[in-house]
Image (cartoon, rainbow, N blue to C red):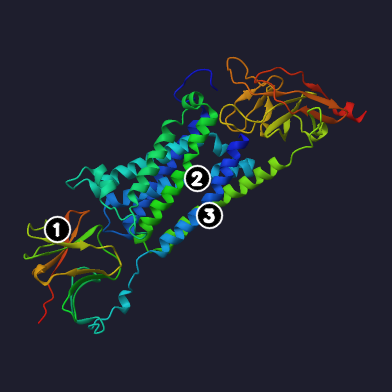
């Protein structure tokens, strides 16, 4: 949470996640180089390392991009989302080493500054087959650097979540640049259909998952309860909301999470202040609504994080008529206390 | 996630779903044609060349071809049956015989870069051709093969 600056808020889960990530990267690089030498004994270590690092970064970026839609489609993928930013930083690190070694290998021994040579050695921008693919990779790396450098909660808090999120949307541009880097680079020279097949599979997976998840979200947004004249909207029946869980409804263009807990009902914004995570998909733990993405907590009756934290989300007025739950569509300022509606299954049956 | 970002995500996904496959198709369609070494004629192709002369590098399946057109233009082609056995290979011509692993002689003249299984073909002026051709691996910084220039009688 955002109480004070810490370099990384380590916990046992993050340590396990990062150990598994580091181990996976080392095994991948070792396997790639080892198998590469077995198949192509004349290949140089630099060439194999460049390819291992490049493919490793490309694979990791696919994983990073698939986690979001997978978590939207199936809650079982939520644990992967928890520490996704470390995957993103690892992607940048692999890409950076790939870029530096490539720069030395292909541009470091001429009479021109390697960084200048990178952009001027090939200027066939009018050719598809000989399109300069290296500047595409450099541009993608610059975006990944920007994202890795601002990945910390310090920047998230200072830039504000909407700006931070918009900035990190650049990952899609970076992905497109990297697909072009691969398509105009190694795929022009490498005839092995396996490589082409893997790239096509990756593109289909990433774009397909995003389109499917996006369509599901869009359909959910389209299901809006009928609007009442006085601003009170019937959002469903209390009995349909599981204990310590929420029903998510779309009111006035944004989602609201209606939680049932301890014989009470409260409505708060569905948008977590941390990374805009879906609060309504979380649970009430220790009396607080807990975001499923990173565990940020808010009290259900006033949308404020418990002390010493200071995050707040908008709240909504709520009332119950028998079993029917009504929420007023006008959001109250973040942190505004609202009297919870009282409800019990026995009362509703009576 | 807020509604405006959800919409932006969805639009971006749709743009990528259309643009990336199109980009891949364009890139694959524009790939250079790869000749099949099995069907490369060992005899002169009289439709294009009046004469062709071959020499083999001391490397598995790597062959140098000197060909002359009816107009007298000369081409030097390098064909590899199983891909280049070394990375980042450049073709030079030189007056000196060079042993494998040696450095490039000072008088070596660059003909061009090889790209793999493609038959790399270079138009050359007759007076630029020296007594030997040399394959130089930029990655290894060493000569990896040499051959005597096929002579035209």
Q: Which residue is mark 1?
A: B101
Looking at the image, the residue that sits furthest to the right is: A350
Q: Residues within 10 Å of mark 1 (few under 14, many from 20)?
A: some
Expressed as whole percent of the image width and height from the top left, the position of residue B31 reads 37, 64
Q: Residues within 10 Å of mark 2 (few under 14, many from 20)?
A: some
Expressed as whole percent of the image width and height from the top left, the position of residue B150 reads 13, 75
In this picture, residue A137 sits left or right of residue A295: left
Depth check: give the residue in front, A62 or A16.
A62
Q: Nearer the viewer, mark 1 or mark 2?
A: 2
Depth check: give the residue in front, B128 or A276.
B128
Q: Which residue is mark 3?
A: B18
Q: Which residue is mark 2?
A: A63
- Tag 1 and tag 2 share a subunit: no
For the point 19% across and 69% down, which residue is it? B123
Q: Are marks 3 and 1 in contact (CB under 8 Å)?
A: no
| Mark seen at residue B126 | none
Label 1 lies in what chain? Answer: B
Pick the quarter of the image with the N terminus of chain A: top right
Q: Is tag 3's residue or tag 1's residue first in the polypeptide sequence?
A: 3
């Amino acid at each position: 949470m955002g109480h004070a600056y810490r370099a990384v808020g380590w916990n046992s889960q993050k340590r396990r996640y990062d150990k598994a990530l580091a181990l996976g990267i080392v095994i991948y690089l070792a396997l790639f180089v080892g198998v590469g030498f077995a198949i192509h004994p004349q290949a140089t270590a630099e060439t194999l390392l460049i390819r291992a690092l490049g493919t490793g970064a490309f694979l990791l970026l696919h994983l990073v991009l698939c986690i979001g839609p997978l978590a939207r489609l199936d809650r079982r993928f939520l644990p992967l989302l928890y520490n996704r930013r470390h995957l993103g930083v690892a992607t940048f690190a692999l890409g950076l080493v790939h870029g530096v070694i490539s720069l030395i290998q292909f541009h470091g021994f001429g009479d021109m500054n390697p960084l200048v040579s990178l952009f001027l050695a090939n200027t066939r921008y009018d050719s598809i087959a000989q399109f300069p693919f290296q500047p595409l990779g450099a541009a993608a790396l610059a975006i990944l650097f920007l994202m890795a450098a601002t990945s910390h909660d310090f920047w998230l808090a200072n830039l504000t979540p909407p700006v931070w999120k918009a900035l990190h949307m650049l990952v899609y541009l970076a992905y497109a640049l990297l697909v072009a880097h691969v398509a105009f680079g190694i795929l022009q020279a490498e005839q092995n259909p396996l490589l082409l097949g893997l790239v096509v599979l990756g593109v289909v997976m990433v774009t397909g998952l995003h389109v499917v998840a996006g369509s599901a979200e869009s359909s959910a947004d389209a299901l809006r309860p009928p609007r009442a004249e006085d601003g009170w909207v019937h959002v469903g029946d209390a009995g349909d909301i599981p204990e310590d869980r929420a029903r998510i409804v779309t009111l006035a263009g944004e989602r609201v999470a209606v939680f049932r807990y301890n014989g009470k009902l409260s409505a708060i914004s569905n948008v977590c202040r941390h990374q805009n995570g879906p609060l309504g998909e979380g649970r009430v733990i220790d009396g607080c609504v807990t975001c499923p993405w990173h565990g940020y907590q808010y009290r259900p009756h006033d949308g404020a994080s418990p002390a010493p934290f200071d995050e707040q989300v908008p709240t909504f007025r709520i009332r119950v008529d028998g079993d029917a739950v009504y929420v007023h569509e006008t959001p109250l300022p973040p942190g505004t206390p609202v009297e919870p509606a009282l409800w019990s299954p026995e009362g509703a049956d009576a | 996630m807020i509604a405006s970002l959800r919409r932006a995500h969805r639009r971006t996904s749709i743009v990528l779903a259309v643009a990336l496959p199109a980009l891949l198709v364009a890139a694959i369609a524009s790939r250079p044609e790869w000749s099949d070494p099995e069907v490369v004629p060992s005899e002169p192709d009289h439709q294009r060349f009046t004469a062709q002369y071959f020499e083999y590098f001391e490397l598995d399946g790597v062959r140098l071809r000197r060909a002359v057109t009816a107009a007298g233009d000369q081409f030097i082609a390098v064909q590899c049956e199983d891909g280049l056995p070394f990375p980042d290979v450049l073709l030079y011509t030189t007056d000196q015989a060079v042993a494998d692993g040696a450095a490039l002689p000072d008088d070596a003249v660059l003909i061009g870069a090889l790209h793999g299984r493609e038959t790399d073909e270079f138009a050359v002026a007759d007076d630029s051709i020296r007594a030997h051709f040399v394959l130089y691996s930029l990655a290894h910084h060493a000569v990896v093969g040499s051959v005597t220039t096929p002579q035209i009688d």
